[in-house]
């Protein structure tokens, strides 16, 4: 994802994304490892997680962290330091949404194989 889109997420949820952190402790030091087309999915996921995270942080006193956000086998994968059933459900829903959303442009797409499995629209399939 481009740095300007990454920055929007980090500015909105600064305690969740440690992009300056030690790469041995968080893969977020590598940034968001997917294309711009999934930005809206990640944004909505974070917005959906806010009240759930606040509730868990009150109970556990542990800060919530996103450890990695990446594309894997054509889907959006999000790793966090801890979760509840509700948080897991939201992350899983974002994954399923990514499998029908072009990773490059955000338009409807589908998972396509080849040398690398990606979720792309017809236009971006011809470019890759």
Image (cartoon, rainbow, N blue to C red):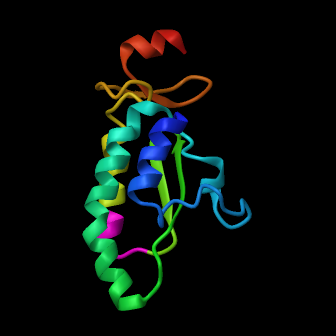
Q: Is residue 46 above or below residue 64?
A: above
Q: Is 68 within the magenta?
A: no
At x 32%, y 54%, the residue is 45
Q: Looking at the rendering, which quadrant does residue 36 occupy?
A: top left
Task: Give the number of callouts.
Answer: 0
Q: Residue furthest front?
A: 11
Mark yes or no: residue 74 visible. no
Secondary structure, magenta segment, majority class: helix
The region drawn magenta spans 83-89
Q: Is residue 102 above or below residue 13?
A: above
Q: Looking at the rendering, which quadrant does residue 102 occupy?
A: top left
At x 34%, y 57%, the residue is 46
Mark yes or no: residue 17 visible. yes
Q: What is the x, y in percent for residue 51?
A: 25, 71
At x 40%, y 31%, the residue is 37
Query: In the rendered view, does 41 fall on the left or right side of 30?
Result: left
At x 64%, y 62%, the residue is 26
Q: Is residue 74 above or below residue 78?
A: above
Q: Is 85 within the magenta?
A: yes
Query: In the rendered view, does 7 fall on the left or right side of 122?
Result: right
Q: What is the x, y in percent for residue 61?
A: 43, 88
Q: What is the quadrant of the C terminus in the image?
A: top right
Q: Looking at the rendering, which quadrant does residue 32 occupy?
A: top right
Q: Is residue 35 above or below residue 83?
A: above
Q: What is the x, y in percent for residue 97?
A: 30, 42
Given residues 110 and 13, the one toward you in this image is 13
Query: In the rendered view, does 122 fall on the left or right side of 29?
Result: left
């Amino acid at each position: 994802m481009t740095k300007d889109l990454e920055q929007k997420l980090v500015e909105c949820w600064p305690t969740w994304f440690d992009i300056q952190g030690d790469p041995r402790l968080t893969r977020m030091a590598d940034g968001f490892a997917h294309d711009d087309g999934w930005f809206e999915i990640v944004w909505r996921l974070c917005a959906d997680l806010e009240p759930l995270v606040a509730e868990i942080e009150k109970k556990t006193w542990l800060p919530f962290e996103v450890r990695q956000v990446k594309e894997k086998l054509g889907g959006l994968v999000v790793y966090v330091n801890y979760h509840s059933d509700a948080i897991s459900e939201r992350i899983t829903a974002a994954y399923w949404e990514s499998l029908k959303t072009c990773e490059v442009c955000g338009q409807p797409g589908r998972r396509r194989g080849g040398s690398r499995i990606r979720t792309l629209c017809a236009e971006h399939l011809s470019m890759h």
